[in-house]
Amino acid sequence: MRNWAWVIVMTAGLQMNAWGQKVVSWDLLAVPYSTTPEGLYAPQFPSWLDSYKSQEVVLQGYLVPVDVATKQYALSRYAFSSCFFCGNAAPNTVVELVFKDQPDHLVTDQFVVVKGILVFNDDDPYRLFFIIQQAEFHG
């Protein structure tokens, strides 16, 4: 019975949509992290997340500006007033977006669904834990 419960728990976060992308939940991305002596965050990626590494995924959330002048945006689990950048959430609740084709106009706090390649950032403390490369709006 315990083995079945483990299988159910491990596959609950692994969903596929009709196009074959892995649908990722924010709970799945809630990886543990530590703080370095310099005050920076260091993610600790569990090995069970490896099946998502460099895979095309779909994630929904709120658009949050990182640097409007350079058109850098992140996807947040929470709206801007409650997100990591305002000090109201953890660093594992935002994902950096690197767009395939830069959209003309992005609206802060717009709820969107994004697809792209999920990259784990474990070596640059000045970037977010997760990066979605080749990001584009989905659905």
Image (cartoon, helix red, strand yellow):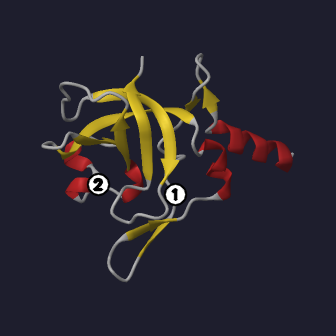
Instruction: Give SS at disc 2.
Output: helix
Which residue lies at the image location 30% right of the left edge and 36% below the top edge? Answer: 62
Q: Quadrant of residue 135?
A: top left
Question: Could you say which is closer to the camera, residue 13 or residue 127?
Answer: 127
Residue kind at label 1, given as amino acid type: Val
Number of on-image labels: 2
Residue closest to the far bottom = 37
Residue that label 1 marks? 31
- Residue 40 vs 84, above or below: the answer is below
Question: Could you say which is closer to the camera, residue 31 or residue 122?
Answer: 122
- Residue 1 vs 90, above or below: the answer is above
Which residue lies at the image location 18% right of the left edge and 26% below the top edge? Answer: 105
- Would residue 53 appear left or right of 108 to someone viewing this image? right
Which quarter of the image is occupied by the N terminus?
top right
Which residue lies at the image location 37% right of the left edge and 58% below the top edge? Answer: 91
Circle 1: is it few (<14), some (14-19), or many (20+) Cα within 10 Å?
some
The location of residue 32, given as percent across then percent down, is 51, 63
Instruction: Give SS at disc 1.
Output: loop
- Would residue 132 appear left or right of 81 to someone viewing this image? right
The location of residue 137, given as percent across then percent down, is 37, 24
Residue that label 2 marks? 84
The location of residue 119, given as percent across then percent down, is 50, 47
The location of residue 77, given as percent across then percent down, is 36, 42
Give the distance between the C-alpha atoms of the residues marked 1 and 2, in whole angstroms: 15 Å
Mark toward the start of the polypeptide (1 vs 2): 1
Question: Could you say which is closer to the camera, residue 39 or residue 133?
Answer: 133
